[in-house]
Image (spheres, rainbow, N blue to C red):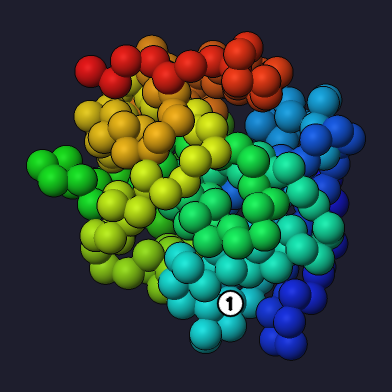
Amino acid sequence: MPTPRSLTLRPGLDVSVRETGHGSPVLVLHGGPGPGSVGPLVGHLAREHAVVAPTHPGWEDTVRPEDLDSVPALAAAYLDLLRRLDLKDVTVLGTSFGGWVATQTALDDRERRVSRLVLIDAVGPVVAGHPVTAPTGPPPGVPASPAPAGEPAAPRRGPSPASMAALRAYAGPTMGDPGLLSRLPDLTVPVLVLWGEEDTVATPAFGRAYAAAFPDARFALIPGAGHLPLREKPEEVFAALDAFLGPKDPATRHRPDPLT
């Protein structure tokens, strides 16, 4: 991951941003585990794209202003970031919670800076019969499994307590927006929805319903992956991304796959 720089978007709001690569711009929004979880993705995209990867205020010891307390507020900050950097024709990509923010950013884009949307095991909408289940695991500071004798304990991979506090501030207690799904038909940009076939946090059925609500979406399963396909099956994710981020001519772009 490149070294971040701090950008002041308004008085009291500084955002830590990593920038790398050249080409058409991609805004990468991380999920609960933090910006490090999208590091390999940033490196892959930077081969052909100008990648902008902010850290959500509240992660990695960054300051979250008290009025930055919802997903729409965070999305508005990222639209300010695109304006500050004068980026247009932007692909916005989000994983898990970052996918929710990415969707909100695209929906609220009045200046039409966003041209494509990529969601990877994203949360956000409330889908009847398919609740989002918080991942389970060891408490903070405890490795996922005991380390072999004589070896150091593996680092914890989940969000830190501070990150979880920021996540709760943005997402609220229900981790979902009941009105989001009904707004998705208004978003006409091409959308790629990638999903781990074994995701138990937000099931593939949830993902299919999410994708089906967009007018122009392609849904693709990543076999053998759970909620973090970037960690579990990165090459499969990269291949799907590269295909989607190729020609944007409607005659050559991937058409939506069947969602049933």
The residue at the far right in this view is 22
Residue 186 sits above or below residue 217 on the image: below
- Residue at image x 45%, y 30%? 216
- In the rendering, at what x and y percent does residue 233 appear? 51, 18
Quarter residue 86 falls in: bottom right
- In the rendering, at what x and y percent does residue 157 appear? 49, 43
Residue 124 sits above or below residue 23 on the image: below
Helix or strand or loop: what does disc 1 sit on? loop
Q: Nearer the viewer, residue 89 or 80?
A: 89
- Residue at image x 20%, y 45%? 127
- Residue at image x 73%, y 42%? 89
Q: Nearer the viewer, residue 117 or 164?
A: 117
Q: In this view, does 172 lie to the left or right of 162?
A: left
Looking at the picture, which amino acid does disc 1 mark? Arg
Crowd band around label 1 with a 10 angstrom C-alpha radius: few (<14), some (14–19), many (20+)? some
- In the rendering, at what x and y percent does residue 72 appear? 47, 68
- Residue at image x 73%, y 82%? 10
The residue under label 1 is 64
Q: Is residue 156 left or right of residue 60?
A: left
- In the rendering, at what x and y percent does residue 101 appear? 50, 55
Quarter residue 197 falls in: top left
Q: In which quarter of the image is the N terminus?
A: top right
Residue 223 visible somewhere in the drawing: yes
Quarter residue 193 falls in: top left
Q: In this view, does 53 lie to the left or right of 122?
A: right
The residue at the far left in this view is 129
Residue 1 visible somewhere in the drawing: no
Q: Quadrant of the C terminus?
A: top left
How many discs mark residues in the rendered view?
1
Q: Nearer the viewer, residue 140 or 46?
A: 46
Residue 56 sits above or below residue 212 on the image: below
